[in-house]
Amino acid sequence: MWRNFSFLRKLTFVVKPEGYASLTDIYDAAVNLGRWRRALDAVASAVDAKAIALLIRRPDPASKDLQMLNSTYLNFVRSPWGIYYGLRLSRLQDPDWDFLSRQPAHKPTADTAIGPSAEELDQRADYAFLRKKLGVGRRLGVRLNSDSVWFDAMSVAFSADARVIPQSALDGTRFLLPHLTKAVEIGRTFAQLKSRYSAVLTALDRVKVGLAIALPSGDIIVENEEAKRILSMKDGLTKPGDGQLRCHDTDQNAELRDAVSKAASTVRGEDSVSECLIALKRPSGQASLLIDVAPLKDSKAELDGPLEGALITIIDPERVPYLKMDRFIALYDLTAAEADVCQLILQGMPINDIAEMRNTSPVTTKNQIASILNKTGVGRRAELIRLVIRVLPPVD
């Protein structure tokens, strides 16, 4: 059985019911790292695959890659044959991952399009071994994230009986990619909280951006200290007595309420919205608050009970001292001059003021800004702030 939804008219393909059903497991894994096996099992069912591996490569060269596997792969790697494969044959995949690292995000690529022909791949030792011991053949690879700091990618393996990758698998993968990407992004912050404080949703004060958790009704059940500070200013965003967030602008208030509702519906597999970004106007005239609404699920009930709702991230561009700029500058290979200009951009300083402060011409400053934007792949200050926070979550 297949299912079409009126709110997805923009899609040019139909999606299996398993595709929507898998969303609840994907967003649960964002909060609970141990749930990735269940999530990838659900993804495998949705795209008619046999095995899936999710790779997360950290920016620190000394860090080991993190791999999440579905049940098929996980059971295999724990077996004697799997241990042999890991020691003797797994490195043959390295060129495949390297190829994906150079590809744009969300572009599924068949293994036969990477370089070697299907016949050559089938004869490669690692392919032949997995076909014999695990029954997998053709594979599909795709990069999830677009920034150049992290490398998040997924390999989807199909039954050895399938000589080509089914179109339905490509369609299902494209449908799920934004959600897998968002879950991994959210998980970076939550994984740090879990590692350092053995908690996630009850340790949100350790995160320096504003965070609030909303129920499907819009009621806020948790907000951290930075969110409380922003709300206390009553400058574009408030939380009145009914416990729901309110925007100063009527249209944006409706947009925020709709975003929370759609995020919660996505967690239940009834919608497909991975994020909603809002630049919230402020009566004071200061830089707009940057709002990001994403689906959130916590089946482990770290709060009062199982949660299906929305994670609302609130960034005040006028106050971002927590940005890890030293590391960001190194990761993006900014020159000393570009680093200075980048810091001033983040402070909201206009071009002429930056030039005057640094005793350079506006033309020189414009060229430096163009170089910064080219290296980071963003187009304006708000995107730069979001990028820094996304690749280097500000957790104490």
Image (tube, rainbow, N blue to C red):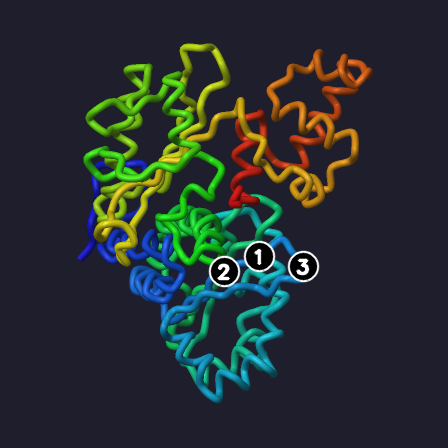
Query: Do the residues under discs 3 and 2 have CB atoms within 8 angstroms?
Result: no
Query: Do the residues under discs 2 and 1 have CB atoms within 8 angstroms?
Result: yes
Report the amino acid beneath label 2: Gly
Secondary structure under tag 1 reads helix
Query: Do the residues under discs 1 and 3 have CB atoms within 8 angstroms?
Result: no
Quarter holding residue 69: bottom left
Which numbered disc, 3 or 2, marks the residue that appears first in the sequence?
3
Kindly tell me whether residue 8 is visible in this rendering: no
Secondary structure under tag 2 reads strand
Write the residue at 36% across / 59% down. 169
Q: Which residue is mark 1?
A: 100
Q: Which residue is mark 2?
A: 141
> Hey, which residue is sitting farthest bottom in the picture?
80
Q: Which residue is mark 3?
A: 61
Which numbered disc, 2 or 1, marks the residue that appears first in the sequence?
1
Q: Position of residue 33 (x, y in %)?
A: 40, 60
Q: Position of residue 201 (x, y in %)?
A: 35, 48
43 shown above or below 20: below
